Amino acid sequence: MTINIKKTIIIIILALLYCFTGKLSVDFQAHVNLSNFGIFAAEGVSLAFALYFGAWVWPGVLIGQLVLALLNGFTPMTALEISVINSFEVLLAVKIFEIFKFDIRFESLKSLLLFALVVLAVLQPFSALLSNLFLLWHGLEAPKIFWQATFAWWFGNVMGQLIITPFLLTFFTHFASIRMTQYLLYAIIYALFLYTIEILLKIDNPMLLFGAALPPAIYVVANKSIAYGAMMTVVAAVISSWAIYHKTGPFCSGDTLSDTLNYNLFLLASQAIVLSMGALFEERRLREVKLQKAIDEALKTNQEQQMMLARQSRLAQMGEMIAMIAHQWRQPLNNLSLVNQLLISKYKKGQLDEKAITQFKTNAQKQIALMSSTIDDFRNFFKSDEKKVPFDIDDVIQNVIAMTEAIFKSHGIQLLYESQNGLRTYGYPNTLAQALLNIINNAKDALLSTSKESMKYIKIVTKKQKGKIIIRIEDNGGGIPQEIIDKIFDPYFSTKNEKNGTGLGLYMSKTIIEKQMAGRIDVINTPNGALFTIYLQEFADDAQ
């Protein structure tokens, strides 16, 4: 189906709806005994179609109004003039609402107020005044009733647009989210409820009807959407009009003026309250959606930052690893160099025999195996854990010490270790080892920056206390300045910029211990240095 055919169908549908609802409104008004009664539904239909589909629907308004005017006894010229006025009205409406960027979904109180203001003060004064001037010009309206007729025209059109247009626009714009079976069920139940009150029970108090009809509508609009609320206000208008048609209910007391005022006030007040509440609830829902989106984006950003920090920390650890491998390889490489020099010396002296070759091969293989073992140890140490497992705390700490002891000794730092056997926890052993490595490397940097000439040490003590495993890492590097001790676990916080410190080591250690190991880490100063204390859950063999 081409676009032109679709537009033609929509124009035909609008013309039919305009003519049908307009005829229904006129005939109904002629039947009842209310002054200035009127919901001229056709005006609401035309405005809704124009705002939703666009200004190109104006021929539907022209045709519908022309046929309606002819059916109601107007001369062809007068009918055409009124049709042109109403067609121009929808073009004017589209232009005004485009200028003010009107939200046809009615998802804000601002859009609702703008809509009401334009209808009351611009569109209907224009339409009612011009139409009645043409009627006066053609002698179809007496001068003495001009203003009364103009007001009645204005009022009927206003009621039609304030009640019908929001109903159709919210239905069109929320159609994808409306569950049609549920939507119709709400309409039927609400119609039966009002029918029972107004027609079967013949309630005669407008305030009692208002108090009974409003809470269900507000409840539905709060839990569903403004489209449901707009539908329920139309249902209320239909049932109340039906009650008036059958001369029963609270708007048929016999006092024409009071009945007119009560009827119109009921409809307008219901519409204003329900749509206002609906707009406020829609604003709240939109804020919640935006807030949730902001939270999701913040979480995503935080996860990306965590991954970036982890990568940077990993690179920093690899730098430490390379330094440790280099240190561990220094002795085997020296030995290989000596064996090589010995081989060359024997060759120059003519003493290179099978025994010398065998001795060279044995010594070289021994040193190469030692270097290969060192690589394997470091590779396993920095390999990421895939799943949580129970493990022995002593094994992890011994591995850390084995990796670092030689390079620490080269700096004159002793690693002291006091352990309580049998301490087991549950988690990621390699990850915990990397957290411990970050802490003792931080202690090493503190010790190297101090001018103390006494023995430098890092002491690790493990023990069990009240079902917790406690790991204490203490150094005698002089401690952490009190003004920064609360910041040392912050990302990118470093006191060693001149040494290219990343400020990630302690942050990653805290993250690993708290998030991956479900533990806790604290730091305090001691008389000689700093003391890091790690608390982990103890694992019992029967815990699995």
Image (cartoon, rainbow, N blue to C red):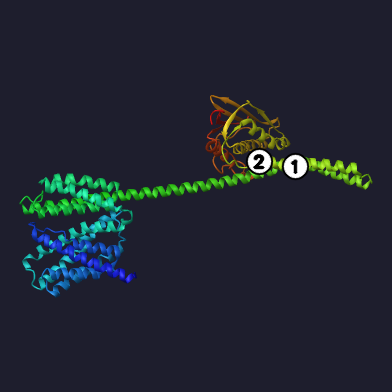
Q: Secondary structure at mark 1?
A: helix
The quarter of the displayed image where residue 424 is located: top right
- The numbered mark, 1 or 2, whose residue comes first in the sequence reads 1
Residue 175 horizontal side relative to residue 62, left or right: right
Mark 1, residues whose alpha carbon is within 10 Å: few (<14), some, or many (≥20)?
some
Q: Position of residue 97 (x, y in %)?
A: 28, 62
The residues bearing labels 1 and 2 have C-alpha atoms spaced at a distance of 14 Å
Label 2: which residue? Answer: 380
Q: Position of residue 539 (x, y in %)?
A: 56, 29
Mark 2, residues whose alpha carbon is within 10 Å: few (<14), some, or many (≥20)?
few
Q: Position of residue 496 (x, y in %)?
A: 62, 42
Kind of residue at disc 2: Asn
Q: Secondary structure at mark 2?
A: helix
Q: Residue at x 46, y 47 (%)?
A: 298
The quarter of the displayed image where residue 359 is located: top right
Q: Residue furthest top?
A: 466
Kind of residue at disc 1: Met
Label 1: which residue? Answer: 371
Q: Position of residue 398 (x, y in %)?
A: 67, 32
The quarter of the displayed image where residue 316 is located: top right
Residues 318 and 540: in front is: 540
Q: Quadrant of the N terminus?
A: bottom left
Residue 327 appears in the rendering: no
Residue 358 is marked as none
The reply to whether dot 1 and dot 2 touch (C-beta < 8 Å) is no
Residue 486 horizontal side relative to residue 280, left or right: right
Q: Residue furthest bottom?
A: 77
